[in-house]
Image (cartoon, rainbow, N blue to C red):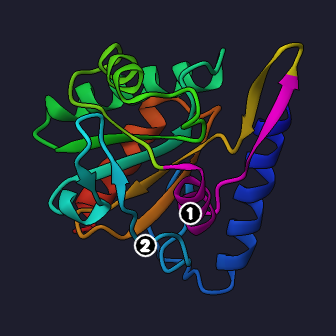
Amino acid sequence: MMRVRHSIVLLLALAFALAAGCARDQPHYNGIDVTGAAIGPDFRLLDPDGKWRSLSEFRGQYVMLFFGFTQCPDVCPTSLARAAAVRNALAAEGIPVQVIFVTVDPERDTPPLLREYTKAFDPSFLGLRGDPKLTKETADAFRIFYEKVPTGKSYTMNHTALTYIFDKEGRPRLAMGHNQSPEQYAADIRTLKRTGS
């Protein structure tokens, strides 16, 4: 699938870009360590209540950030179901995790639809949106590719299928692949916690 292939290419590019600076005594992660990469570093998007939200307001929590759309047939629901499993496992250990879903399809993803979609996975999940211009600016800042693909009388969206994990200081630390398990995600957040991040 095009969006998954694009995610693999992006993960490999990030890995090679950062490999030169990696020390051998660095912690082991299942995901790609993107510490220090030019990702974000923040956004300003609207929640379903029309309130402006930013990544910086979640300091003190680990953040899992995913870009997608509500009519996504497979990648998005799988990613959010996995995120719910990760959040539940870590909550039982007292590790705070906030999941943020940013739509790349603001044309169809209205505030009420976005609210219901994210709540179906976990009431704490936050769905965010912007107008088309702000959506593109935000996706570009976070190195997220997306495009509208016509399908008959409608369309679907191709998009990068990865999840960013931010540490408690709001810094981008990991890029996790779509094919990784909840256990691998949770293990990497535990490693961040153990190393004081």
Q: Quadrant of the C terminus?
A: bottom left
Residue shown at 37% from the left, 54% from the top:
45
List x then y, in percent, for residue 75: 63, 25
List x then y, in percent, for residue 183: 43, 31
Check disc 1: other Cα within 10 Å, few if <14, some if 14-19, many if 20+: some
Relative to 1, is 144 above or below?
below
> What stretch of residues is rendered in magenta?
131-150
Relative to 92, is 18 above or below?
below
Determine if residue 28 is in view.
Answer: no
Mark 2 or mark 1: whose residue is earlier in sequence: 2
Instruction: Name the kind of residue labelled 2 in the image.
Output: Pro
Q: Is residue 62 left or right of residue 33?
A: left
Label 1 sits on residue: 142
For the view shown, which residue lies furthest in the left direction? 94
Q: Do the residues under discs 2 and 1 have CB atoms within 8 angstroms?
A: no
Q: Is residue 73 left or right of residue 50?
A: right
Determine if residue 7 is in view.
Answer: yes
List x then y, in percent, for residue 10: 74, 58
Q: Nearer the viewer, residue 115 or 29?
A: 115
Name the quadrant containing residue 111: top left
Label 2 sits on residue: 41
Q: Quadrant of the N terminus?
A: top right
